[in-house]
Image (spheres, rainbow, N blue to C red):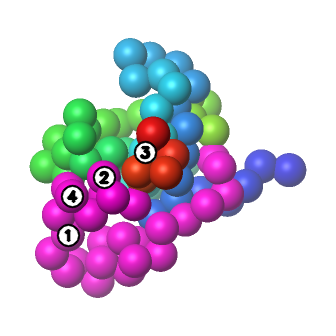
Amino acid sequence: MEKAITIGSVVYSRAGRDEGRYYIVTEIVSDGFVRIVDGDVRRLDKAKLKKLKHVKVTGDAIESVAEKIKTGAVIYDSEIREALRRYNS
């Protein structure tokens, strides 16, 4: 069974130049696309549009980041990097 993808979900890139890196979902664009960031190469101001079939959902979610995105609070790339530190190390 496929895990549900939500804002704040941690995903693993399975294809493309960014293959092998972990990202956080910042927006669900449509049924087949999401926007992802890692706070380093892909910052919040230039989120990557990625097909769902090219990412693997880990089942983890970063709730603090998700809450800030949903409420529209200010969020920094450093917070994203810190949240993903244990994944991308």
The answer to the question of whether label 2 and label 3 lie on touching residues, with beta carbons closer than 8 A, is no
| SS under mark 2 | helix
Tag 2: Cα neighbours inside 10 Å, few (<14), some, or many (≥20)? Answer: some
Mark number, residue 23 = 3
Give percent across and percent down for residue 34.
43, 46
Give the residue displayed 20% in from the left and 56% down from the top: 77
In this picture, which residue range is highlighted in magenta? 57-83
Q: Which residue is mark 1?
A: 75
Judge whether residue 32 can be spotted in this image.
no
State yes or no: discs 2 and 1 in contact (Cβ < 8 Å): no
Callout 3 amino acid: Tyr
Residue 38 visible in the current orientation: yes
Note whether 11 is above or below 69 in the view shown. Answer: above
Position of residue 43 in the picture relative to residue 63 (left or right): left
Instruction: Say which amino acid is labelled 1.
Output: Ile
Disc 4 packing (10 Å; few <14; some 14–19; many ≥20): few
Q: Is residue 6 magenta?
A: no
- Judge from the rendering whether residue 50 lies leftward or rightward of residue 60; answer left or right: left
Q: CA distance from mark 2 to mark 3?
A: 9 Å
Labels 4 & 2 near each other (Cβ < 8 A): yes
Q: In this figure, which residue is indicated by the disc labeled 2?
A: 81
Gap between marks 3 and 4, in whole Å? 13 Å
Q: Is residue 73 magenta?
A: yes
| Residue under the point 20% across and 45% down | 43
Q: Nearer the viewer, residue 45 or 81?
A: 81
The amino acid pointed to by label 4 is Ser
Instruction: Identify the residue position indicated by label 4 in the image.
Output: 78
- Where disc 4 sits, the SS reads helix
